[in-house]
């Protein structure tokens, strides 16, 4: 006895809902469907582009088990085991995601770029220097008396970096030196000097640029539908354990 037969003869609970009418004729069963703002069930794809996962409406509901005419109740499985239509080559125990253009299920594969992405913001590099005379007394002549030299590791040779360095006076001989890197994971050497004499401490910094990840890009978030229980090819009827989440 194969797995589909075992499940069909078992008492494993599946959750089906029939409280929403079809917004259009759904001629093909087992495809993913969404519920729209009017509480009508529509096939995901041309009829209902769900867009970003988690967006509502329309929102991913489940997998239609019948083929209702427009206005008739749609029987939608929202939990448990459900037959589905594969949209690509699938192996048993693959994690499956919705193909929002067809309503079919395809493998979720992070090695192929699946999953959400984050916008990266480069962190500003900020350092404080102290400027004093030979006796250690702070020099309070202002930031205009200081100059900077910024270089970066460009193809294994330190060259002048393109970023602008700003220097501002804090108080008591302390000055804030900062710049915003233009690329991440780049080694920089920052030097600060005073042309008319005085001691700058520290006068040199070696830093590496880093990025801060922002919120996930909404358009990159994907809807994971569940786990494949049988293997199949594009267009085959498959079997999935529903386990929805967004990623």
Image (cartoon, grey):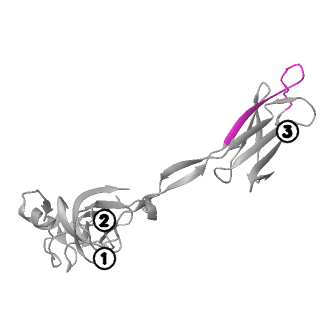
Q: In the rendered view, would you say 136 is above or below 206? A: above
Q: Find numbered disc 3 in the image and state the secondary structure of the residue it sits on.
A: helix
Q: In the rendered view, would you say 143 is above or below 135? A: below
Residue depicted at 74% across the width and 51% down the height: 153
Q: Indicate whether residue 130 is drawn in magenta.
A: yes
Q: Specify the segment rendered in magenta.
A: 125-141
Viewer-nearest of discs 3 and 1? 1
Rounded to the nearest angstrom, the CA distance separating label 2 from label 3 is 58 Å
Q: Is residue 225 left or right of residue 12?
A: right
* Foreground pick, 86 / 162: 86
Q: Which residue matches tag 2?
A: 58
Q: Earlier in the sequence, mark 3 or mark 1?
A: 3
Can you give x and y, in whole percent of width and height, for residue 36 in the image?
Answer: 27, 66
* Foreground pick, 212 / 12: 12
Quadrant of the frame with the C terminus? bottom left
Q: Which residue matches tag 1?
A: 234
**Residue 163 in sight here:** no
Q: Which image quadrant is residue 127 in?
A: top right
Q: Residues within 10 Å of mark 3 (few under 14, many from 20)?
A: few
Residue depicted at 45% across the width and 61% down the height: 111
Mark on residue 144? 3
């Amino acid at each position: 006895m194969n797995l589909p037969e075992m499940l069909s003869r078992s008492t494993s609970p599946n959750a089906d809902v029939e409280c929403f009418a079809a917004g259009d004729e759904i001629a093909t069963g087992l495809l993913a469907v969404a519920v729209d703002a009017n509480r009508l069930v529509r096939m995901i794809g041309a009829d209902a582009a769900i867009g970003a996962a988690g967006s509502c409406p329309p929102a991913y509901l489940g997998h239609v088990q019948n083929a209702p005419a427009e206005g008739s109740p749609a029987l939608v499985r929202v939990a448990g085991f459900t037959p589905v239509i594969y949209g690509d080559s699938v192996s048993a125990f693959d994690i499956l995601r919705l193909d929002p253009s067809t309503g079919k299920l395809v493998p979720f594969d992070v090695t192929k770029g699946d999953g959400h992405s984050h916008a990266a913001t480069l962190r500003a590099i900020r350092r404080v220097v102290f400027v004093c005379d030979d006796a250690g007394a702070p020099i309070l002549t202002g930031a205009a008396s200081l100059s900077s030299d910024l270089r970066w590791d460009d193809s294994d040779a330190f060259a002048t970096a393109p970023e602008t360095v700003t220097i501002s006076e804090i108080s008591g001989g302390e000055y804030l030196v900062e710049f915003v890197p233009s690329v991440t994971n780049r080694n920089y050497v920052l030097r600060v000097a005073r042309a008319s004499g005085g001691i700058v401490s520290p006068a040199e910094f070696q830093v590496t640029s880093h990025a801060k990840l922002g919120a996930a890009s909404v358009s990159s978030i994907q809807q994971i539908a569940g786990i494949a229980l049988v293997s199949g090819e594009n267009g085959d009827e498959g079997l999935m354990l529903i386990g929805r989440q967004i990623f």
